[in-house]
Image: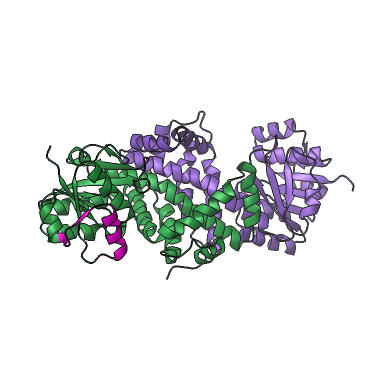
Chain colours: A green, B purple
Amino acid sequence: MAARTIGILHPGQMGVSIAANAKNGGCRVLWASDGRGEETTGRAEKAGLKDVRTIARLCAECDVILSVCPPHAAEDVADSVVSAGFTGTFVDANAIAPERSRRIAEKLKSAGVAFVDGGIIGGPAWKPGTVLYLSGPAADDVASCFGDGPLEVVALGDEIGRASALKMCFAAYTKGTTALLSAILATADRLGVRDDLNAQWKRGDPSFPGQTENRVRNVTAKAWRFAGEMEEIAATFRSAGLPGEFHDAAAEVYRRTARFKDAPETPTLAEVLAALGRRAD
Amino acid sequence: MAARTIGILHPGQMGVSIAANAKNGGCRVLWASDGRGEETTGRAEKAGLKDVRTIARLCAECDVILSVCPPHAAEDVADSVVSAGFTGTFVDANAIAPERSRRIAEKLKSAGVAFVDGGIIGGPAWKPGTVLYLSGPAADDVASCFGDGPLEVVALGDEIGRASALKMCFAAYTKGTTALLSAILATADRLGVRDDLNAQWKRGDPSFPGQTENRVRNVTAKAWRFAGEMEEIAATFRSAGLPGEFHDAAAEVYRRTARFKDAPETPTLAEVLAALGRRAD
């Protein structure tokens, strides 16, 4: 098979690592710097991605375009390739509900764009442990763009929505429980029983209070984009007839801590608990 | 200190174990069989509790009365000792929100009854690992009724509500995550990705899928009383300014599986998932 040309929209920390894996797999990998900041440019250059400046040129040159962005931006990013006249294969690898993925697929299909549903589980794919799940008729074709790792690529068959459903169900627990623990610590603190709770937790697992504090503090850097992901998970649960309120609450927890985006240092627990006690603006 | 007389309302599996610990501590322990079933009678007799038949007589003979019942019954049980003219110390050891505990305390105080707030963490106290937390002005006095174990009794000071707050915060995670996992498995099943989710979970911890299935199946026997407990936790979070929706959802999960109360056998996972997919009647 001839080497393919892949475009990445817009290379954040996760996206650039996925792009680097496609490069390892023998693809030409392009990106478009127009309107992007210094940090993104630095990341893309470091990974050896070729800058074609505009989305129009990216769409003209690429066989496959990957979208890796915060969930709330997924539809706009998809729209941008339609507007630019793309006619290749578009991969949405974002943490969105399967129904939203199918809606984007329909829109792209009517514009002549093939669609592959994707979901990434794990951190930036510079070392083994991260999986890109793909589903849809062109899933195997897209999977073949990637090399032997460190990113693992798993095709889940023809049905658009499966990759997103898996991602939603997996993140429902990991990010859902971090949000729940955040709310528990804030409640215990407000009610004056946080030390007692930690003492009780220690009876079961001496490391639990420390691990919990770290989870609750460290997640704040990503809270600004997890709020949207929790809303997608709530929609996913509801589409399956299950209650979405777990993740409505998780979204509210992350909205309240979204202010810590770009904080120069990880906030103290006291700072996080204070933010959790206030409604988001 | 002279041996005290303690009454237990109404000895379920947890209550009878708490009563047996008070007996080990040198107390006379009474219960009232009027209106109770064979199973309760069998449990009380086996534990050597003395049956005084009526709540009126229990109230007349006891220095301390313990209430251990499902959360939705807590206020009625407290009312029953007021109606019977009790004037000793009433211990509510139930999984209720601190605000509800304070409300019961006020009502009892105006009827001349001293109130101690309690919360039990752990299973029936036949072996070490279960803690009865107590708070309120008479907490130390009640704590002194118990012997050296297996039940551990911890007094948390004078403030009514602290023991309940601790219980709520602790159960928020244990029972909250079991409900969340139930909803996740049901969602994954409905969306056709349950096997994929288990495979992904196995990457992190090979025992996780099996443990999760066991949690989700085994909790169904207690779901009928956990629904009320989740509502109390939701109220507790809201009283602290945090979102209560995590446990609104958990309550709905347990309402949907409440039908498995008294099931002759633990239901299969398929039976649990089918129940989770339907709204409670």
Q: Position of residue B114 (x, y in %)?
A: 76, 58
Residue at (16% x, 51% y) in the render = A106
Instruction: Return the residue found at the far right.
Output: B2
Magenta region: A36-55
Establish if A161 lies above or below B195. below
Q: Looking at the image, which residue is at 27% across and 47% down?
A: A20
Q: Residue at x 75, y 37 (%)?
A: B20
Of residues A78 and B279, the one nearer the viewer is: A78
In the displayed structure, B43 sits above or below A37; it is: above
Q: Which residue is outermost to the top?
A: B265
> Which percent across, then down, holds residue B273?
40, 37
Question: Which corner quadrant of the image does residue A36 belong to?
Answer: bottom left
Camera-nearest residue between B239 and B115 = B239
Residue A177 x/y as whole percent: 47, 49
Side of A38 relative to B75 (left or right): left
- Number of labels in the image equals 0
In reply to whether residue A41 is colored magenta, the answer given is yes
| Residue in view at x 45 percent, y 32 percent | B206
- The residue sitting at the bottom extreme is A281
Vertical order, B87 against B208 (above or below): below
Q: Is residue B278 magenta?
A: no
Q: Is residue B74 visible?
A: no
Left or right for A71, reference B26: left
Q: Nearer the viewer, residue B103 or A107?
A: A107
Residue A189 appears in view: yes
Residue B106 image position (x, y, % from top left): 69, 63
